[in-house]
Image (cartoon, coloured by chain):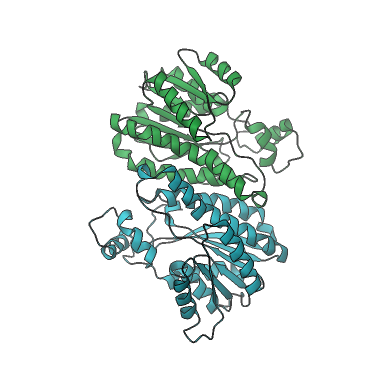
Amino acid sequence: MDLGIKGEGALILAGSQGLGLGCARALLDEGVKVLVTGRNAETGAKAVASLNGGSGGGDAGFIQGDVADADDRARVFAEAEKRLGKVSILVTNAGGPPTGPFLEKSLDEWRTAFDLSLLSAVDMARMATSGMVERGWGRIVNISSISVKETTPNTPLANGLKTAVIGAFGTLAREIADKGVTVNHILPGPFDTALLRRVARDIVQRPDLSEEEAVQEYAKHGPMKRLGTVEEFGSLCAYLCSRKAGYITAQGVAMDGGLVTALY
Amino acid sequence: MDLGIKGESALVLASSRGLGFGCAKALSDEGVRVVLNGLSEENGAKAVKAIGGDTIFVSADVSKAEDRERLWDEALDHLGEVSILVTNAYGPQPGPFMDRTNEDWRTAFEETFISAIDMAYRAAPPMVERGWGRIINISSMSAKEPSTNTPLGNSLKAGLLGAFGTLAREIAAKGVTVNSLLPGPFDTDLLRPFAKYMVNDPSLSDDEGVRKFAETVPVKRLGKIEEFGAVCAFLCSRHAGYVTAQAISVDGAVVKTML
């Protein structure tokens, strides 16, 4: 299927590893110019090498920056526009906030999570949207979590603030729905990523397990009994960014192997 | 129906008028002792008079940490314990997503989100210790279907459902329930200036906006504060102990989502 997005310019936040990198790979395969961001230069260099096939022949790039930091966001966006010509595809994403019970979180942890999980997405979307609306085409895909649909234990910060992004982007999506710009969410369940390894013990509420055991335990919660792959995730992201997906907006699509049991 | 909560003690935030007042009045009618809160002493005095009994009003801005602390201390002084907490806050300012600044978002976060969870942090541990408690969060139907031109409220009230959904399950086995009410259009002072934005016609007067908005409600009228208070009192009752982590729309069927 030709997705019709060859030559578009994509900025993928926190895209140097995991699901963000999966999105970058899939978009790159469709002929999209891709820039990924991340906090760590070494991880970024590895991501670029893997995206460009290790030969240095591709033109995927990396911008170092912390999406939780307002100055970094402004700098990252300006540089992305310069290097891509235009940002017509934005994938918002951020590392997960710390886990742990609701009753053990301080107000300052909530404030930090607000900057990381909500404001990062809102601010970048606002920067990117103006140009998309002007040009009459754009795609925003927010990497969320199934925990916005069914609360996961021990991840109150993410449960709260990732849900807040859904409300914020639901409003934005409808403001610009007739301008050729769509805003959607992918709600990942258990995927084979470093982030999942970090939080799996908390989610399955089994501190006695090793990270790897906890990840496998979480995978067993779902009817498919396996983790998703970042390639699968990237393909949905690329599809939502495609010309074909222009009538889909303000949606949150779970990609979780059937783990969430809510009917919709 | 005897709700079985006579003698319980409720702190109701932002309750000198509107939906918060409706909750306070309904709880008081069931024999619950009530502490009211708001910004205006004048409105507070009126509310205290309307409810009667040993009700008191504490003037405090729940968006400010020091005010929350003082409010909590005064409520405890008066009530001895808080076994029912109703979280509520005035709605953040309306206007398009694209016109909101990072600062607007930060302010709304403190007012709408932090205010509620901070009070829940104070209230929940003693409820758990006692083995009984009720937390009701006054949210909005916009947490379920985002309203036009209220991105701050749409986002942060939805976020609170995620936060309180997590809390609810952490303490579900301790006799404490945490639920949210999602009001639609009610006849409150708060709604009047917002209605014209909800019908996407800011040029209307407040009255015209309210009338036009009421036409969009399947029941063709605004809800009454007393109707809202009744749901709140029921969720606070002994009978509602198996209902937790729910978000219940009270909206005259405005929201069309099936679940």
Front residue of this view, candidates B209 and B153: B153
Tell which chain the image draws in green: B
Q: Looking at the image, which residue sits at the far left?
A: A208
Tell which chain the image draws in cyan: A
Residue at image x 35%, y 27%? B238
Front residue of this view, candidates A260 and A60: A60
Left or right: B158 as drawn, with respect to A173: left
> Looking at the image, is B53 positioned above or below residue B172?
above
Q: Position of residue B233 (x, y in %)?
A: 44, 26
Residue B144 visible in the displayed image? no
Residue at image x 46%, y 43%? B161
Q: Position of residue A140 (x, y in %)?
A: 58, 62
The quarter of the displayed image where residue A257 is located: bottom left
Residue at image x 49%, y 54%? A117
Q: Quadrant of the N terminus of chain B?
A: top left
> Looking at the image, is B32 positioned above or below residue B140?
above
The quarter of the displayed image where residue A121 is located: bottom right
Left or right: A218 as drawn, with respect to A11: left
Q: Looking at the image, which residue sits at the far right?
A: B203
Residue at image x 39%, y 63%? A195
